[in-house]
Amino acid sequence: MALELTIKPDDIRLLCDRVEAAQEGAYAIHKLTDDYPSMTIDDGYAVQAELRQRYLAKGHQLAGWKAGLTSRAKMEQMGVHVPSIGFLTDKMARTESIGIKTSEMVHPRVECEVAFVTKKDLQGPDCTLQDVLDATDYVLPAVEIIDSRFSGFKFDLASVVADNGSSARYVTGKVRLNPRDLDLTKVGVVMKKNGEVVASGESSAVLGHPAEAIAMLVNILAEQDEMLPAGSFVMSGGITEAIPVQAGDAITAEFQILGQVSMTFVA
Ligand code: OOG
Ligand code: MG
């Protein structure tokens, strides 16, 4: 299967120029469908694939993948009701100990996610939850810092897919567990900003089971003639709505059984 495009290759490259410049310059642009109203989700994935090729050509390493818009809280917050995927690079990875620069982003938000690391190749289009569990080496807690490049954090599915699912930064915690050693539908999470609870939820909010989001991601990759190789890091999507952050904020995401992930934001 391949993507079916309605936008010409030259225009895909032009839209990629816009997104790439906004990502690298940390400025907001209007959503791509304002100028290309007929743009489809496949067109969005074509822009995202072009963006991935450009970053890899610049020497960034592919570090994994992320599923997005996989919980009702996220879908309702963003007004987009179809899950999506994006890629992660080594340049997006951050650690708990070093302040994360908000000046490199437009309007960052944080969200708690269960992440997976695989030990077997996964190939769509018929990947199932059980296939994902069988292929999982371990799960770990993660916080994704998303940053839509679209004004007001407002977009439609085709635009957000082209913007690589708002991917910006991510931080992982230290606990690693075999998926057989916990009930992945029952991981409660509490997000605290400067010591106050700002969001809470349970991992079943992600498509009923976070591994379902990984299966969905593998099946979307298959539409692009790609597979998920053994050893991949994959985030399954925000459990709660995303919370805006600014320089000076301290965030702690507390996951039941999986421990916590903390980070601070600096200008
Ligand atoms: C799109 C990215 C969604 C998630 O975990 O749901 C996402 C967005 O909300 O900007 O990463
Ligand atoms: Mg996310």
Image (spheres, rainbow, N blue to C red):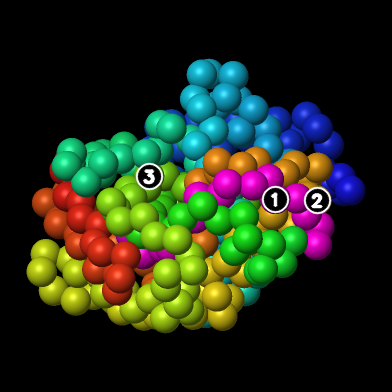
Q: Residues within 10 Å of mark 3 (few under 14, many from 20)?
A: many
Q: Is residue 43 left or right of residue 75?
A: right
Q: At x 80% / y 51%, what residue is drawn?
A: 223
Residue 122 is marked as: 1
SS of the residue under disc 3 = strand
Q: Are marks 3 and 2 in contact (CB under 8 Å)?
A: no
Figure check: 9 above or below 256: above
Figure check: 37 above or below 188: above
Please state which amino acid type lies under the numbered disc 1.
Leu
Q: At x 42% / y 44%, what residue is drawn?
A: 168
C-alpha separation, residue under disc 1 versus residue under disc 2: 14 Å
Q: At x 24% / y 62%, what residue is drawn?
A: 260
Q: Is residue 188 left or right of residue 220?
A: left
Would you say the beta carbon of the disc 3 residue lies within 8 angstroms of ligand 2?
no
Q: Which residues are magenta?
A: 108-126
Q: Are marks 1 and 2 in contact (CB under 8 Å)?
A: no
Percent of width and height locating residue 224: 78, 45
Please state which amino acid type lies under the numbered disc 2.
Glu
SS of the residue under disc 2 = helix
Going by the picture, which residue comes out furthest to the top?
58
Q: At x 72% / y 44%, what residue is drawn?
A: 227
Please state which amino acid type lies under the numbered disc 3.
Arg
Which quadrant is home to the C terminus? top left
Q: Which residue is mark 3?
A: 169
Q: Nearer the viewer, residue 39 or 213?
A: 213
Percent of width and height locating residue 2: 86, 45
Q: Which residue is mark 2?
A: 223
Q: Earlier in the sequence, mark 1 or mark 3?
A: 1
Q: Is residue 116 left or right of residue 252?
A: right
SS of the residue under disc 1 = loop
C-alpha separation, residue under disc 1 versus residue under disc 3: 25 Å
Q: Earlier in the sequence, mark 1 or mark 2?
A: 1
